Image: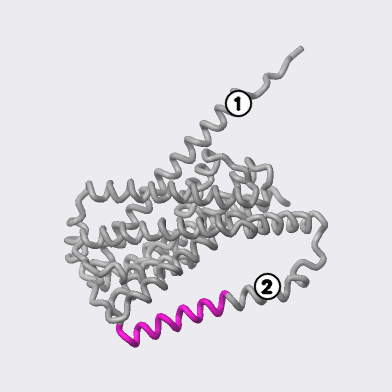
Amino acid sequence: MIGAHQPQSKVRARWIIIFRWVAALAVFAVLLYFLPVASLRAALTRVPPIRFVIVLMVYLLAHAVGIVKWRMIVNTAGAQLDFSTSAQCYLGGLFGTLFLPSIIGGDVVRIAVGLQRSPNPAAVLAGNVVDRFIDVISQATLVLLGLILLPGSLPEQFGALARKILLILGAFVLFAVVLVFLLRKTLFAGRSRYFLHRLARLRHALRSVRERPQLLAMGWLLGVLIQGTFILLNALLAISCGLFLPLRVWLFAWPLAKIAALLPITQGGMGIREAVLVALLLPFGASSSLVLASGLVWEGIIIAGGILAGLTAFLLRRAYRATHDSFAIPRSDG
């Protein structure tokens, strides 16, 4: 039964990937249908290839800081991973975000390698959850910073709507957390002793992270630095396309568009991020075609970076296997 179920799961996963790539292409097709293609093409040709390469290199350097942050968080939980293994986990996850069924697929890749290498697998799981939470908090920090700096640039009605949306999202998250806390006994009632043991180890790992708030604060600062770097790079690409907007506008709009891209509709949020960004920047007088052009160039950065990350993770895995095999004790036939 299990053997029959696995092929079905693989086929279903492939269909999910195909569907989400098609959905991404459909969103881009709709945007291209309603936007002037000539302006879009002209904006894309303004981006010098050397600038694209430089932005790609800085993008990868920012993710190198992301590796440091991820390793710090999971090791705080007790994972005991070296840098090479952490890099393989993180970069494999970056590749998986693009080519696995959803953004969660990237987390699956990160966790899968860590579970095999760590003496405390629960710490890898707990640390990855905390790292994701820090990323969301970092993006929310930049949104709030943008809102603080926006008065005078933001139309009053649009600003009120944005604040209402943020309040609704915050209330929804708070409601979900409170609901899980109230129903925790019901959710875990009747579970096996093995499951409860695993859950206890996960709670212990989370407690280890919570007991070191200075490292959480450092992770948050690194998260803000990484996300802020992405915003600066996106603004630089937009300037190359001919779109000039104050940085405070990007601080407000770009993280919101990235959060919206977490919805499991398209592959890696492609298309959704650009559509939301076009809608958010319209009230500031931004040209839709220029916003889409900068978004398409950014997608090129993400795809190129994801492919390079996957290749690096593959090479690190081969190097680990070669080193591991070289230290293996040969079996004696006698």
Position of residue 156 relative to residue 107, above or below, is: below
Q: Position of residue 238 (x, y in %)?
A: 25, 62
Q: 217 or 46, which lies in front? A: 217
At horizontal 69% and vertical 48% (from top left) the residue drawn is 3
Looking at this view, is 225 or 39 the one in front? 225
Please state if 83 lies on the left or on the right of 289 as rendered: right
Give above or below for 309 relative to 153: above
Which numbered disc flags the more N-terminal residue, 2 or 1? 2
Q: Which mark is residue 325?
A: 1
Q: Secondary structure at mark 2?
A: helix
Dominant secondary structure (helix, strand or loop) of the stretch shown in magenta:
helix
Q: Quadrant of the C terminus?
A: top right
Q: Of tags 2 and 1, which is closer to the observer?
A: 2
User: Residue at left 55%, top 80%?
Assistant: 171
141, above or below 171, in the image = above
Give the farthest residue toward the bottom.
Answer: 157
For marks 2 and 1, give the CA distance.
Answer: 45 Å
Question: What SS does tag 1 mark?
Answer: helix
The circle drawn on residue 180 is 2
Q: What is the span of residues highlighted in magenta in the rendered image?
A: 155-173
Q: Residue at x 42, y 73 (%)?
A: 144
**Is-magenta flag for residue 156?**
yes
Residue 158 among magenta residues = yes
Give the amino acid type for the residue marked by disc 1 in the picture.
Answer: Asp
Furthest residue toward front: 214
